[in-house]
Amino acid sequence: MKTPTSSIRSTLLAVALCAASATCAAQSANAHEPLQDRPGATTSAPVATPLLHEMFQAHAVLQRNAPIRVWGQAQPGQAVQVTLARRKASARADENGRWVATLPPMAAGGPYTLNASAQGGAKQTVNDVMVGEVWLCSGQSNMVLQVHRTLDSRAEIEGSGNDSIRMLTVGETGSVTELEHFATPVKWLKAAPATVPDFSAACFYYARELQKTVKVPMGLVTAAWGGSRIQAWTSAGALRASGQYNDELDVLATYANDPVDAVAKWGEVWGKWWRGRKDVQAGDEPWADKYSATTGWRNAPPALGPWEEWGVKDLAAYDGMVWFRTSVNLTAAQAAQDAVLLLGAIDEVDTTWVNGRGVGSTYGPGSGREYVLPAGLLHAGENSVAINVLDTYRAGGMSGPASAYALRLKDGTTVPLDSAWKYRTAPGTDSPPRAPWQTASGLSTLYNGMIAPIGKYGFRGMLWYQGESNTFEADRYADLLRMWRNDWRTRFGANLPALIVQLAGYGMPKTQPAESGWAGLREAQRIVANEDAHSGLAVAIDIGDHYDIHPANKQELARRLARAARHVVYGDKQPPSGPVPASARREGDAVAVTFADVTDGLVAFGADGPIGFELCGATQDSCHYADARISGNNVTLRAPAIANVTRVRYCWADGPVCTLFDGASLPAGPFETPIQ
């Protein structure tokens, strides 16, 4: 990473940007959502590089019935030979020392020994290698969530021993460029009471369930990060091809070489977005140096802290943006020094300006920030500091204390910022763009740090449990999900099966029909899965938790994922999920919805008819709950103003009550469909 010229500034930059940038690794056993950018090991490759890439270690599982790609590092020009179960392949290292060899396909079996040797050079032996089915499990915190946090976890852990299920967990790592090696050590672990507690529960239970019918070794690679957006898991090339993120990607490219300049450019991009909002008055630029924080601004409590705890009615349950402004007075001698802006804990996303110039932006609930200031930015007298804080979950704001906010100068002294902070909520509900270098919410950062190091390892399919962090842009998620799926298939193989978890219910049910970003995102997941023969959907609406975004019943989720896999991957004739809408049509004064993929008839639990149906016209205020009755594989709906309805919605809320199932106890998933 290139930095400003002076050695002091270089040191400050390395320290400050490690805490806030996507070039730092992060690891956490905590799967709470959202997680944060955390400092950690740098993303450089290990000093002593073994002959084989880190994917090839003891207890590894290789994909059966497909060519086995093996790679690693040797001296440039060296010949390398690889052997596995009397099968051999050879390669020659290129000018950078990289080599790739391809072994012929093998049936499931093992354990085997994998040997690699470089002519006249290094040798490496890997024992206990199995051949079977390998799955890539990814997404956000519901894929991270560990076995020890699930239902009946004590008994599950005690009975978890299984030598033929192995998992490799990729450490939480973001990077602005694609990595060849993992930033933190990885290891294949066999399922056992000592290892399983920290396994991804959805991934482990899935393999255990699938193994009941697909009786081969199961290899699981888990690469997941709580609170992550889908854009962070998509490569820069795919995002660039979409044409939607060019400004952000340009900033990201600058960030790889000159972070300080990139942050300033990001301030300009963010400002352009702000000025384009329909709720913003011309000239309302709270980050501007000479901005007057008067009309609409109030004094923040001296101790700061989460705004929900200030005793202000409008902030008691507020999720959104709040502006903060203060200043710092400097002498000419102080202003001439290199400086780092120290910000105490902020929850969860900040974008920060000093004297009208962008100096930093971090996604990190509850973490502090340190932003290197460019030379010449500070001046004698009053210097303005403006911070836009975005909170989307639980407590938000500047946690304080006020003394944690200061300038640290080159001579080691600190100058506290004025503790008289002013604040103002931001108008509107649209969410601001995220700095592209942020790990979990940036662009390509997790793809670069956690997927690229996997190389082109062989997989049978991929499991995807993600979307909670994109519910604010549900109207775009279908395109984003297609982009992600195509992108990973480009890396790991065309038509690689994708098993998608539809978001579980979360939040209290509504008393009236309402719009829902969660429902809209579930519909995007349903549409994208249905349009592709190599994709399957696991419905989870009924196994959510109104009070917890992390439902603990990952065992039932795994059963549904395995059922989808048996249909999509292995050609099982049973329906991949529960009842799905086939058509909706008018029948006199009613609307009849016909369902397909019904096992042993439709049933409604807890009432004479199913709950959760709506009949709607063109607008949201035209939606009404419908009286529903089951007849065979049909549900007949009646509601007020039936003549004007044009569409049917079912289970359309963040945390709806859904009672339509089939005889196999599989739920009908949420959907919206036009009336024909």
Image (cartoon, rainbow, N blue to C red):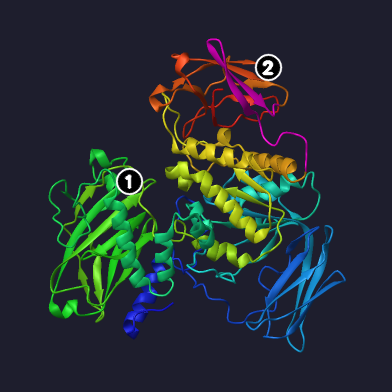
- Callout 1 amino acid: Gly
Query: Is 176 left or right of 661, judged from the image as shown?
Result: left
- Callout 2 amino acid: Gly
Over which residues does the magenta segment extend? 571-598
- The local crowd at label 2, few if under 14, some if 14 to 19, many if 20 or more residues have their Cα within 10 Å, is few
- The residue at 79%/58% (across/down) is 64
Q: Quadrant of residue 533?
A: top right
Q: Nearer the viewer, residue 313 or 273?
A: 273
Query: Element type at marker 1?
Result: strand
Image quarter of the C terminus: top right
For the residues labelled 2 and 1, the Cα–Cα distance comes to: 46 Å
| Residue 27 image position (x, y, % from top left) | 51, 63
Q: Is 261 within the magenta?
A: no
Q: Please say if 107 is above or below 649.
A: below
Q: In which quarter of the image is residue 286?
A: bottom left
For residue 320, the mark is: 1
Mark 2 vs mark 1: in front: 2
Which residue is disc 2 drawn over?
Answer: 632
Q: Which of 606 and 176 is in front in this view?
A: 176
* Residue furthest bottom as drawn: 120
Q: Is 584 within the magenta?
A: yes
- The residue at 67%/64% (across/down) is 456
| Residue 169 image position (x, y, % from top left) | 61, 60
